[in-house]
Image (tube, rainbow, N blue to C red):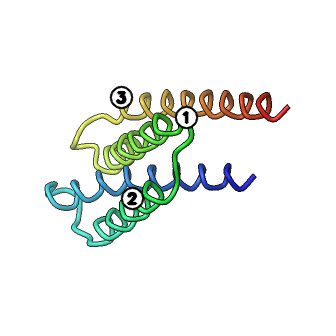
Amino acid sequence: MKQTIQERGTLLLAFVAGLSVNASFSALFSSMVSFSVFPIIALVLAVYCLHQRYQNRTMPLGLPAIAAACFVLGVVLYSAVVRAEYPEIGSNFLPSVLSVILVLWIGVKLRARKAAGVEAAE
């Protein structure tokens, strides 16, 4: 049970890091999005926490791919939200479709890991 909570924390940190990367980039380089220092702070803290987890614990097999997918999901989801808020930037159709595909892929992989963990415990 503790392992599952740690894995979920890693995936959540990867998702927050993805959101923060795109938010920081948008805040610094997009004239439409207002500047805020909070995405930069969130990015630094998320990357620091992920680095600490990487140094102190070994990642189970298959978790790095899911963490990378969570990171990409954060990037794409923030892009979809910004494009919905500022339609002048462009359509949010592609980021929305990619977000749904990534969520479904992550869900399938997490179910497969859970099923494999249950079979390994028996």
Q: Quadrant of residue 49?
A: bottom left
Give percent across and percent down for residue 44.
32, 66
Looking at the picture, tell me which residue is in the foreground, 21 or 52: 52
Identify which residue, 88 or 65, lies in the foreground: 65
Q: Secondary structure at mark 1?
A: loop
Q: Earlier in the sequence, mark 3 or mark 1?
A: 1
Residue at figure coordinates x 37%, y 34% from the top left: 95
| Neighbour tally class for label 3: few under 14, some 14-19, many 20 plus, Cα within 10 Å | few
| Mark 3 and mark 2: Cα distance apart in space | 31 Å
Q: CA distance from mark 3 to mark 1?
A: 31 Å
Residue assigned mark 3: 94
54 left or right, relative to 31: right
Quadrant of image for the C terminus = top right
Identify the residue position indicated by label 2 in the image. Answer: 51
Label 3–label 1 contact, CB within 8 A: no
Q: Are marks 2 and 1 in contact (CB under 8 Å)?
A: no
- Dot 2 lies on which element? helix
Residue, disc 1: 61
Q: Amino acid at mark 1?
A: Leu
Which of pointers 2 and 1 lies earlier in the amino acid sequence? 2
Spot occupied by residue 79 in the image (x, y as percentages of width and height): 33, 44
